[in-house]
Amino acid sequence: MFLEVAMSRCAVALVVVITLFLSACGGGDTDRRRNDDENACVPSCQDGFSCVAGTCYVRVQPEDCGEGEEFDPSYRVCLVPSCEDTVQNGGEEGVDCGGPCELSCEDEPVEPTCDDGIQNGGEEGVDCGGACGLSCEDEPDVDPPTCDDGIQNGGEEGVDCGGSCEEACAAAPSCEDGIQNGGEEGVDCGGPCEQACEIPASCGDGQVQGEEQCDHGGTVELACAYGEASCEVCNAQCQLVAGQSSGYCGDGVVQSDEGEGCDHGGSPETECEAGETSCQVCNAQCELVDVEVESGCGDGVVQSGEDCDHGGSPQTSCAYGEESCQVCNAQCQEVAGRVTGYCGDGVMQPAHEGCDGGDLDGATCTSVGSAGGALSCDASCELDQSACLDVEIAELTSGFAHTCVRTTNGQVYCWGRNDDGRLGDGTTIYKAQPTLVPGLSNVTKISAGGYHTCAIQQGGTLSCWGGNQTGQLGNGTVVDALTPTPVVWAGTPPVVTTVSAGSTHTCAIVSGGQAYCWGSDESGKLGSGGAVPSSSPLTLPTPVSGLADATQIHAGRYHSCARRQLNGRYVCWGRNSYGELGDAGYFGSSSTVPRQVDDADYISGFLSGPYVAAGDRYSCARGTFGTIYCWGSPAYGQLGDSSTPSTSRPNEVFGGPGSADFLSVGERHVCAVASGTVYCWGSGQYGRLGLGDTDNFYEPFALTMPSAIDVQVGGMHTCARLTDGGVMCWGRNSHGQLGDGTQVDRTTPVRVQF
């Protein structure tokens, strides 16, 4: 019995989690080789890591260091200062030799000099790593400029390549090289000569303003820092451009001025050539280090000094499924192996798993042959198709304590309460999961009411089933029907275009626009036009007085509403104790004829709106532009305004989505869909709002759930049709109306188990 229309809202959530890993030597793709003289680890760390004292640390920025840590610029890592970490840091005055405190840190193993590349001893300036005559007191910045400082300046006509003067200025100047040189009067913009190179007036003042992307503050940046394979710099026009790489460990070029003794070109060397028992290799820090191979390692026999012997093929990885293990490395030492994956690590291993956690490798219910639904991963890392659907849902409807769907092939499934046969399966047994309604085919429209259900078949034939105490099945009796029963018409049956099942009555529109209602005429909700409502049920379809141009109709609990075709206006009839008919002149009275909703001409977007619906003591409509209006009793917040008294004037629902794509009205709560997001407000009893509690809400609140196409509000529960093809329900579940196989109330959405 409960409403459909819609609204729009965008929601964006972004959460970024950054995790830094520290890996011991031998972890990942590293090997560890023991040097007897230095007792030092010579690893090959993964890209992005530096080895310090036998451990691989992730490279970071200075600001990433935590309390008690110190950034070491040589390795670009955060370290807790120690006189045994082989790095001069903390309060150490000498060079840290990596031994016990009583052997190092105070006694310097090497006499400090001004050409050892480290500021130590009594040096007051920056140690430049050259001859003493180059001075540690003078600042390292070169001034005046020279042709080998890596920047084109001075009187240079060519491009300064940063080498010796004889090698440097060889490149011919060009107006497209991004450097002002040759006879250029402007700043070379790096494009064709005819393009202008204008510099913003404020460029160089150190403040980013106007169209500037950056501001170099007077010193143009051209090159990336050592260690950066790429970067952005601020050029002479105060634009961010790609900087010139000045080199890094692993680029295949030895930057001796940066302390490189070698450059491995991307693959650090860790082992000697076959047959060599000792050699020098280039490690991950571009340092030449000595490597010795112990005799016998790799022969398959554990000998003195060996923990194990790999027999020629060093082990590096744990077997699949192991979260940790010990392996035999290239030095015949037992070390922690690299974990290659296991079920539960969140990464699918195609050779062993069909999925892992949320990683389904792109699989969906559709790709595995189902019509729709939600594919998931079980605890064994196999695809779980239990929430996939064998049928494709085309329409959803919710009654007081039951729910039904129509499939694209014209079949109907229902579940929930069934003591009066409202599920249509020929029994009176409650069903907590969808059950096929037999005998129906080519169904084009369905509607679930308080105690009964109706369906239109292709060609316009209308059938109803379930409770019939007030004649709401329209077959001339007041006897319940356990299976679909045709509605009986006076004369030739008309072509029925739409139907709405209310609590104890039913309304429909036939071809041409004439509206009919039947069942209980309590408070005049059938609209028969009599002087007073009928005290007896009208068990056959009865024309609604003066409503021959209806385009949409909705049967509520004690009143009904419709939209007229000729002027697009809304009309309602039946009880008006709370202003639910929208006619202030009839407030407190009932009407057996349609009354026009007041003030429609004065509310922007209200006139000619596509949908109107009747709840219990109130009504709602969706205007032309997606705005939702409600009127009547605000007792549970369904008018969207806690301060509004009972009113006949349509009240715009504030605080919710401004443009609804779909709207649905129940007895005491309302829900809508906007751009795939479901919003609900009103009574929260039994969790029917889906917000995780049972509180009432006086304005629309968004639910946390998958994207939805439409929503259907029942008596004390709600269901939504999802874009993935599935259905989710929430609220009261006393009779299995949520379809999840239980009778447990849910305050948040759960999937229907088809």
Image (cartoon, rainbow, N blue to C red):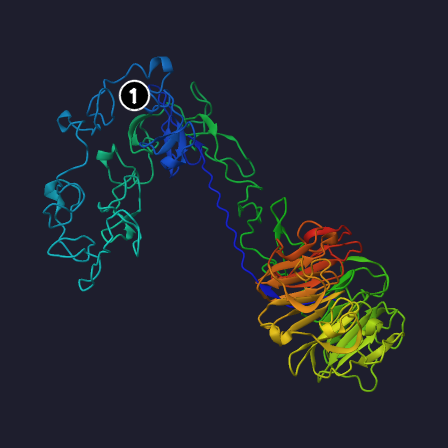
Q: Residue at position x 55%, y 41% from top? A: 345
Residue 484 appears in the picture as rendered: no
Q: Quadrant for residue 66, please give it.
A: top left
**Residue type (three-letter) at the residue carrying disc 1:** Val
Q: Is residue 380 above or below residue 644?
A: above
Residue ID at (76%, 50%): 744
In-image side of 572 versus 380 (left or right): right
Point out residue 263 in the picture as x, y percentages from the top left corner: 27, 37
The residue tagged with tag 1: helix, strand or loop? loop
Quarter of the picture holding the N terminus: bottom right
Residue nearest the observer in this picture, 220 or 488 = 220
| Residue under numbered circle 1 | 95
Q: Quadrant of the C terminus?
A: bottom right
Left or right of 39 in this view: 360: right
In the displayed structure, 36 sits above or below 563; it is above
Q: Where is residue 96 in the image (x, y as percent from the top left)?
A: 32, 21
Q: How many labels does the image show?
A: 1
Any part of residue 490 in sight: yes
Asked if residue 191 lies left or right of residue 78, the reply is left
User: Is residue 401 shown above or below 42?
Assistant: below
Q: From the viewer's perspective, is residue 522 above or below residue 89?
A: below
> Of 104 and 490, which appears nearest the observer?
490
Left or right: residue 537 versus residue 172 is right
- Which percent across, then down, holds residue 713? 71, 62
Residue 475 in the image, given as x and y percentages of width and height: 86, 76
Q: Nearer the viewer, residue 553 or 347?
A: 553
Q: Give whichever of 439, 642 is nearer the camera.
A: 642
Residue 567: image quadrant is bottom right
